Amino acid sequence: MKKILALALVAVFGLVAFGQEIPRIALILATGGLGDRSFNDQSYWGAERAAQELAAQYGVAVEDVLSYVEPRSIAEFEAFQREFARTGEYTIIVCIGFDQAPVLAEVAPDYPDQKFVVIDAVADAPNVASILFNDWETAFLSGVVAGMMTETGKVGVLGGMDIPLIRRFVQGFTQGAMWANPEITEDDVLVRYVGAWNNPILGKELALGMYQAGADIIYGAAGKSHLGVFAAAEENPDWWAIGTDVDQAWSCPEHADVIIASGLKRVDLAVYTQIMKAVEGTWTAGVLSYGMVSDLGIGTGIAVGRQDIGDYISASYSEVEIPGEVMWKVVQAVFGILDGSIVIEIE
Amino acid sequence: MEILSLNLFIAALRLATPIALVALGETYSERAGVINVGVEGMALAGALTTAVVAYFTGSPTLALIAAIGVGAFLGALHAVWSVYLRADHVVSGAAINLLALGFALFLTRVIWGWRGASPSAPTMDAWILVGVGLFLIGISQIYIFRTPWGLRLRVVGEHPRAADTAGINVHRTRLAYTVLNGALCGLAGAFLFNNLGRFTEGMVGGRGFIGIAAMVVGNYRPLPALLAAYLFGFVDALQMRLQDYIPSQFSLMLPYILTVIVLAGFLGRAKVPKALGKPYIKEQG
């Protein structure tokens, strides 16, 4: 009997000691959910990469390190944030998406020892790292490609929702198109919103509407909803699309024939870096911004053409041939943004 | 005005098709006395099945048949719960919605490693399914009101005791039309998949519920329900184009405002089958 008890005690203490050693990561995704081959998937890849490295280091399974949830509505964010925080087991809780910030600002102070990260918005609390991206830079570069490549002189943007974050995409894209092509005016950039991040059927209809109204290139900034843009572009050989956040010609290879470029936003890099810093003990709270003209040099850019050029232009898996003059214009835009001769005006 | 173009009416027809198919299915099952709020899940299951079968066999036709089969199966499940085991119809339907969604997330993860979405898979021309849908709706209008089978269907929903006395098997009739409802929802899901070329878990996006609304507005008749569905599709297509003129927040509200207004106007006047949602218990002895 004693022996069994002793064994049980050893087992319990062993487990506790073991449990403290393994770093654990919680990831709360945005409402668009995984499978968008863009923002959410990319966030997951960043966390997964960190989890794989940590799992290998500690000799455990990836699932023991990484827990993730896909809330279906904004109302669920608070419950998940609190649920993870309450256990006190997680080294860091990563919250994806701007609409987690307001509730996180209220939740975080209740768990002062818990480290939080929020992407795309600022949650003002002493234990939260808020990560921002200069979205307008990547949108501007996408606009340059659209402005150069359009044959009808009209382009379009499909936004997820009419919110400041997406409006900055729209403003960057519009200014990029106008900068690259002086014949394009603000009226030549059609802007329509889905009103949801996970409704590609509506996204397709909206895209068809813009194509039929004369736009031949549509930039998608609507999460899973803009998968509908690619489906719509397939219906006519003169219609093209530009992806967002990751090289979508790579993440959606079946649409590599219509996706001419993708604006890049390295959410994966930010998530990975935050997790590793938290595990290594070098993590700090505060506001961090990624972008070409910001404290963290990389993070935004564009995937276009066949080869990497510098830090901000990456090769794309797109099957569409991009003329040299278009690439040259993109390079000029990158230099313009870096040296400050191009100033993108955002609200 | 530039927005009132042929494309607008075509887009409206595309948006209306899944709504109309669900409305037709719901018309059948509610006429028989079975409320089915599981239409959303049945359509989702139909879309998922189409994606899986088309992806692995490469045959959109086979995928279509499978989607209708899976929809019918879920319909049968709902009928067993609500008709034979006398569970609350709404609870059973809600359970099917949750089941389908959970299963979709699980299956996409297992098969493709992406939760909630599929890669592209072979499709058929979605317009074929629009044609099929319109044909079925026309036939159904005649079937329900001009044939003896339609009369039996209506009696089962209005007065099951009388139907039973006349020798109609109430439970079997309800089972059959609930299965048909499921099959039509599966067809609606297949249309959604073929329209987009990939599955995503949000692709039904409330169209099932709007289908039920269209049925109510159509007063449990297939053709008026089609008109109601077309109205919903039209307003949705119109709001997209209106975004160039008015702020998207207002424009995006239009379909929902319309649903509320129209439902408020019609709900009171709709002639609800009398035995709707009530289990039928055969008198003993």
Image: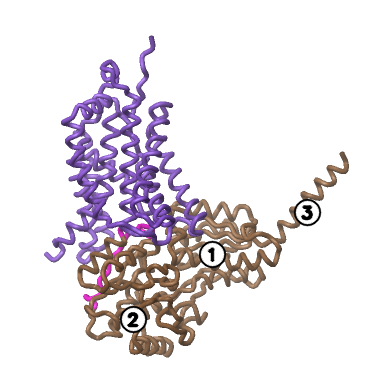
Chain colours: A brown, B purple
- Tag 2 near tag 1, CB within 8 Å: no
Say whether residue A190 is magenta. Answer: yes
The answer to which of B142 and A327 lies nearer the viewer is: B142
What residue is disc 3 on?
A14
- Does label 1 or label 3 sit earlier along the sequence? 3
- In the picture as drawn, the residue positioned furthest to the right comes out as A2
Q: x, y (%) of residue B158?
A: 25, 24
- Does label 2 or label 1 sit earlier along the sequence? 1
Q: x, y (%) of residue A205?
A: 27, 61
Say whether residue A214 is magenta. Answer: no
**Magenta part of the chain:** A186-202
Other-residue count near label 2 (Cα within 10 Å), few / some / many at <14 / 14–19 / ≥20:
many
Task: Give the amino acid type for the residue marked by disc 3 in the picture.
Answer: Gly
Other-residue count near label 3 (Cα within 10 Å), few / some / many at <14 / 14–19 / ≥20:
few
What residue is disc 2 on?
A145
Residue in view at x 30 percent, y 85 percent: A180
Q: In the image, is B8 to the left or to the right of A47?
A: left
What residue is disc 1 on?
A125
Spatial CA distance of label 2 from label 1 is 39 Å
Above/below status of A113 relative to A269: above
Are marks 3 and 2 in one subunit? yes
- In the picture as drawn, the residue positioned furthest to the left comes out as B1
| Foreground disc of the pair 2, 1 | 2
Spatial CA distance of label 1 from label 3 is 36 Å
Task: Give the amino acid type for the residue marked by disc 1 in the picture.
Answer: Ala
Q: Chain of mark 2?
A: A
Residue in view at x 33 percent, y 41 percent: B183
| Foreground disc of the pair 1, 3 | 3
Task: Give the amino acid type for the residue marked by disc 2 in the picture.
Answer: Val
- In the picture as drawn, the residue positioned furthest to the top comes out as B285
Q: Which mark is residue A189?
A: none
Q: Secondary structure at mark 1?
A: loop
